[in-house]
Amino acid sequence: MVERSKEGESLRFEGIGKQFPGVRALSDISFAVQPGSVHALIGENGAGKSTLLKILGGAYTPSHGHLQMGERPLSFRSAADSIASGIAVIHQELHLVPEMTVAENLLLGHMPSRFGIVDKRAMANRARELLAGLAGEIAPETRLGSLSLGQRQLVEIAKAMSRNAHVIAFDEPTSSLSAREIDRLMTIIARLRDEGHIVLYVSHRMEEIFRICDAITVFKDGRHVRTFETVEGLTQDQLVTCMVGRDIEDIYNYRPRPICDEVLHVDGLLGPGLQLPVSFTLKGGEVLGFFGLVGAGRTELMRLLAGLAKRRAGEVRLEGRPLALNSPREAIDAGILLCPEDRKKEGIVPTASVAENINIAARHQHARLRCVLSNRWERENAVQRIRELNVKTPSPEQQILYLSGGNQQKAILGRWLSVPMKVLLLDEPTRGIDIGAKAEIYQIIHSLAADGIAVIVVSSDLMEVIGISDRILVMSEGALTGEVLHDEADESRLLNLALPRKRA
Amino acid sequence: MATQHTALNDTPRRQLNLRRFFNDWAMPLAALLIFLLSAVFIENFLSPLNMRGLGLAISTVGIAACTMLYCLASGHFDLSVGSVVACSGVVAAVVMRDTGSVPLGVAAALGLGLCVGLVNGIVIAKLRINALIATLATMQIVRGAGYIFSNGKAVGVMQPEFFYFGNGMLLGVPVPIVITVVCFVFFGWLLNYTTFGRNTMAIGGNQEAALLAGVQVDRTKIIIFTVHGLVAALAGVVLASRMTSGQPMIGQGFELTVISACVLGGVSLAGGVGMIRHVIAGVLILAIIENAMNLKNIDTFYQYVIRGTILLLAVIIDRLKQR
C-alpha cells in the first residue's frame, strides 16, 4: 500500500541519477522543495528537467537515489504509484481525450455507476464540483476538443485536484497559453501554494518565474547546479550565467576559414512556423549557426529551404537565381541538402541497407536511362563514402537500423556527399550522438566549409553552436531575434536573445 | 588507412548472415520442403497431368502477386485486383463479340486495368486516401461494371486465336505458365536493379525519408498502382482465355489470396521488405497445399480453415521477425 503524502511535508530528491543506454541523463540530483512554495526548475534544453519530472511522475525509475516525502522514501513502479502517493505531473502534451466530454475526462477510470451503467447526472454534478473555483464557466457536458488549450489545462488541473494531489508539477504550462490564460494560471498556482501544496514549475520564461516562484533550482547537463532559496535580489543575468556554466571542452576545433561569395540569399521568407518574415544571407565556406529554444521555428525554416514545406511569401535565391523549392527533389537538384532533425523518422530508411541509404539520392544520375542501376557505381560509391566518413558497419549490406546514431548520421552525410552540394542544412546534427562521433561530425562540417560549401547548423546546444559557427542567428517564437559573430558570441548573450519576450 | 579498412570488418558477420539467410530463404525452402513431402506422400502428385494443373493454378495468382509485391513493398495494398481480373475478362469478351477483333479485345481489357490502377494510384498518392478504403471502393465499382458490361452473365468468346493465352503451348510449356515465369523474372529484376524498384522499397521503409532524399514519392506510387492494374488485367485475360469466356462473378476473394500468398512468402505488410522469391514461395506454398488437399479429397469447408490457419501463422511469423 502506497502511503499518501500529507500536508506540511517537504519533497526531497536524494541523489537521483538516471542512466539511459549510452547517455547519463541525470546524475546525483539532491534538493528539497518546501510545502506552501512554488519551486522553479530551470536549465537549457536537455539539462534534465523533463527527465526529473518523468521520474517524479513514475514514468521512469531512477538508476540511483530516491524521492523522499517528509521522512518516508518513495519508490514508484508505475505512473499509477505516483498518482496514488499524491503527485500530479501536468505535461506539455495533456493526457486528455479530446473526443470525450469534460466530465468523462475528469472522472475517467472512476465514473459513478450503478451496475456498470454510468450515472450521468451524478457524473455531471461531481464534475461541476471539481471545476468550481477553477473554471466554473466550463460546462461538464462540453466536448473537451472544443475547449481552448488554456481551458484544457484547467481541466487537467481539476483532474489532479480530484485525486487530492499534494505535489503538482507543471512542465512548461504556458507555452501555448494566451496572456489572459497565463494570468489565470498564475492566480491558481498562487492559490495552490497558499493552501500548502508543493508546486514544481518548469519554464523557460524568466518573467513568469520571477513573478510566481519562491525558490529556483538550476540544472545543467543533467546535474544540479544550484538552488536559490529565495528570488529576492536575484537577476536574470545571474540565472543565465548559472544555467550556461563555464566548462567548455574544445572538441570543436574552430579555425577561421576564407569565406567566399554569397551563395544563399533568403528574403522575407514566411511559412508554417514562422511568425515574422525571415531574411538572411549565407556565403560559401561559411558555417552559420541557428540557435533557439525548442519550437523557435528553426526546424520549420530548414524544411522551407529543403522544399518540404510551402512558403507563403518571400524569396530564396541560390547564387543569384530564384528557386521555386516546390519539392525536396528541386532543392536537391539545386544543391540544397537537409540532414533532418529526427533521424529515425525522416532520415534513414530503416528497412534498407547502409549502401541503399547512401545511394538513394544520387543513383539516378548514374543509372542508364536514369532507370537501370549501375551495379558498379552502387558498390563503389557506398564503399567510398563509408571509408571517407569512417562509418562503422560490418558491411555496406548491413541494415542501417542496427548502426549507432552517430554512424546513421554519417551515412546520411554520405548520401549528400554523393550528390553535387552547394548548401548543407544540418538540423541538430549531433543530438543523441556520443562525443567521439560528435567530434568527427564537426570535422566533416569544417572540411566541407573549407571546400567552399555553405553550411547551416541548427543546434539547441549552446556550446556546440558557439564552438563551430562563424556566425550565429538566434530565433525565438518564429522570428529572427539577433545575429552574433563567432568572436563576440557568448552563452548569456545568445540565451537572452533566445528566451521568449513578454507576450503582447 | 588501416583503421578505415577495419571499420568495414570489425563486427560479427556470422550472426548477421544467419539472420539475413533466414529472412531471405526460409519460405522458399519451406515451399521446396512442402513440394518434396507432397511428392513422396501423395499419390499422383507428380503425374504430368497434376503438375500441369498445379502450374495453371499458380499462374493467375502468380501474375497478380508480382505487382501486388510492389503495392505491399511501398506500404500499401490493393483490394480491387479480383474485380479487375473479372472485369477485364468480361471487357475482352464483350469487345471481341462486338468487333470480332482479338487485338482490340485484349487492348481494351488491358486499358481497363491500366485506368483502374491509375485511379487507385492518384486517389492514394495525391488525395492521400487510405489504400484500404480507396481500393475497397474501386473493387466494388469495377465488380459492378463487370456485371453491367456482361448483363450479369458469362460472355462466350468465339475467336480461337484468343484461346492461345490460356490453353496454348510454347516450347512444350503451357502459355499461362510461360507468362507467369516471365512476370516473376521481369518484376524481380525491376525491383532489384532499377531506380523505380529501389524507390518503391524506400517509400515502404520510410516515406518521409524517401521524400527528403529526393524520391518522387507520389509519382512512384501512381506508377506502382497503374502497373499493378495493367498486370491484373493481363491475369484476367489469361483466365478468360482458359475459360473461353468472360465471367463477371469470378475472382471473388482473389485479392485476399494474392495478398495471402505475398505475406505467406515473407513480404512485410508494414512495407519496405519483400523480394520476388518471397512471392514465388508464397504462391507455391498456397497452390501446393490446395492441390494436395484436393488430391486427398479434403472437404472444401476444411480447406478454408486450413488456408486461414496457414495465413495466420505466416503473419505471426512476420510480426515476430520485426522484433
Image: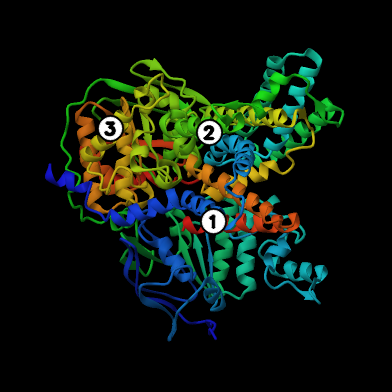
Question: Could you tell me if the residues under marks 2 and 1 are in contact, i.e. CB atoms within 8 Å?
Answer: no
Q: Nearer the viewer, residue B75 or B155?
A: B155
The quadrant of the image that shows the N terminus of chain A is: bottom right
Q: Find the distance from the CA under tag 3 to the CA under tag 2.
A: 33 Å
Q: Secondary structure at mark 1?
A: helix
Q: Find the distance from the CA under tag 3 to the CA under tag 1.
A: 49 Å
Residue B243 at x, y = what percent? 74, 32
Q: List the residue tagged with mark 1.
A: B40
User: Total marks drawn?
Assistant: 3
For the residues tagged 3 and 2, is the chain the same? no
Query: Splitting the image into 4 quarters, where does residue B141 fall?
Result: top right
Residue A223 at x, y = what percent? 30, 65
**Picture layout, residue A381 above or below residue A245:** above
Q: List the residue tagged with mark 3.
A: A381
User: Which chain contains the residue that carries disc 1?
Assistant: B
Task: Indicate the amino acid at tag 3.
Answer: Asn
Task: Indicate the amino acid at tag 2.
Answer: Val
Q: Which mark is residue B181?
A: 2
Q: Nearer the viewer, residue A57 or B122?
A: B122
